[in-house]
Image: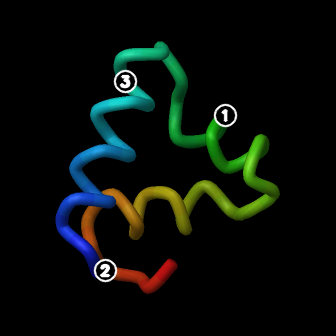
């Protein structure tokens, strides 16, 4: 997984005050998916 993506996702999510669950809902994915993206575990 692209390290820049993982770092930016978490940085922007936190700066906007969103939880992983809120981001997941907006992107129509599971919150576990957002967590994996932020950890660099899953492909986008």
Q: Nearer the viewer, residue 5 or 14?
A: 5
Q: Is residue 25 left or right of residue 10?
A: right
Label 3: few (<14), some or many (≥20) within 10 Å? Answer: few
Residue located beneath label 2 in the image: 41
| Label 3 SS | helix
Calculate the distance from the C-alpha at mark 3 to the C-alpha at mark 2. Answer: 19 Å
Q: Is residue 12 left or right of residue 33?
A: left
Residue located beneath label 3 in the image: 14
Quadrant housing residue 33: bottom right
Calculate the distance from the C-alpha at mark 1 to the C-alpha at mark 2. Answer: 20 Å
| Label 2 SS | loop
Compared to residue 20, the image places residue 30 above or below, namely: below
Q: Position of residue 9 (x, y in %)?
A: 38, 46
Q: Which mark, by number, is residue 22?
A: 1
Give the residue displayed 40% in from the left and 69% down from the top: 36
Q: Is residue 25 left or right of residue 20?
A: right
Give the residue displayed 62% in from the left and 40% down from the top: 23
| Label 1 SS | helix
Q: Position of residue 44 (x, y in %)?
A: 51, 78
Label 1: few (<14), some or many (≥20) within 10 Å? Answer: some
CB contact under 8 Å: marks 1 and 3: no
Q: Is residue 26 left or right of residue 37?
A: right
Looking at marks 1 and 2 on the same chain, the residue that comes earlier in the sequence is marked by 1
Give the residue displayed 52% in from the left and 41% down from the top: 20
Q: Nearer the viewer, residue 36 or 7?
A: 7
CB contact under 8 Å: marks 1 and 2: no
């Amino acid at each position: 997984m692209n390290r820049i993506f993982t770092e930016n996702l978490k940085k922007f999510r936190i700066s906007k005050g969103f939880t992983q669950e809120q981001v997941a809902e907006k992107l129509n994915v599971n919150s576990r998916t957002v967590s994996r993206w932020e950890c660099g575990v899953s492909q986008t």
